[in-house]
Amino acid sequence: MRAIGRVFACLIGFMLAIVAAGLFLLIARSEGAPTDPADAFVYWGHFVLSAGLTISMLGFTALIPSAIAMVVSETFGLRSLLFYLAVAGAMGAAAVFGMSSLMREATHDPQRATMMLAASFVGGFVYWLIAGRMAGLTPRAAPAAGPQAPDQNPPSAG
């Protein structure tokens, strides 16, 4: 039963991590909403459309590497935030250095590269918050409460 729960936690964590990374990219790139209501309507319509396209492209790009990382972390019970940030940073670096169709033109723009790396760290952190902190099919045992006090009434012999 725990395995089914972990699969759902991984799926929900992946989806929310991709949404967080995509929104981070768009917000970091935006220049602020206009004050005129007619312009604001167009701005927010464009923002929603851009968010959908960005998030779907991020999900498509990160699906296979993320699935591999999820299987490894669940198999070995890796729960360290550092592991998830390292994996997310590696995926972001792969995108920045042109190994992804998402960022081919960003290889010569340091600002875009920095935003992509930061967005990947945001996604890794969100995944860790949702699913990574409890990774593994077997729950870890709680640590002992400390030394036990000796029993005040030892059993009597006899």
Image: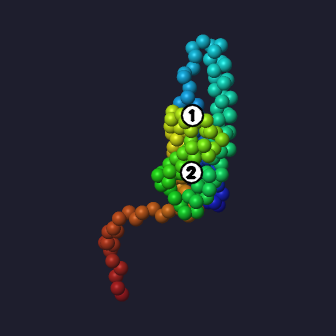
Q: Is residue 138 above or below residue 23?
A: below
In which image quadrant can residue 35 be found?
top right
In which image quadrant can residue 5 be found?
bottom right
What's the distance in space between the residues labelled 1 and 2, CA to CA?
Answer: 22 Å
* Residue highlighted by disc 1: 25
Q: Residue 76: x, y in percent?
A: 55, 63
Residue at point 56%, 51% (across, down): 131
How would you rate the neighbour count of disc 1 (Cα within 10 Å): few for under 14, some for 14-19, many for 20 or more? many
Comparing 56 with 141, the one in front is: 56
* Residue highlighted by disc 2: 131
Comparing 2 with 41, the one in front is: 41
Q: Amino acid at mark 2?
A: Ala
- Would residue 12 be seen by someone viewing this image from the given angle? no
Secondary structure of the residue carrying tag 2 is loop
Residue at point 60%, 43% (across, down): 98
Which mark is first along the chain, 2 or 1?
1
Secondary structure of the residue carrying tag 1 is helix
Q: Residue 101: x, y in percent?
A: 66, 41
Q: Amino acid at mark 1?
A: Leu
Q: Is residue 79 left or right of residue 153?
A: right
Quadrant of the image containing the C terminus = bottom left
Which label sits on residue 71?
A: none
Q: Is residue 34 above or below residue 104?
A: above
In which image quadrant can residue 56 be found?
top right
Q: Residue 89: x, y in percent?
A: 52, 47
Q: Is residue 136 left or right of residue 81?
A: right
Q: How is the image coloured?
A: rainbow
Q: Nearer the viewer, mark 1 or mark 2?
A: 1
Quadrant of the image containing the N terminus = bottom right
- Would residue 156 be seen by someone viewing this image from the given angle? yes
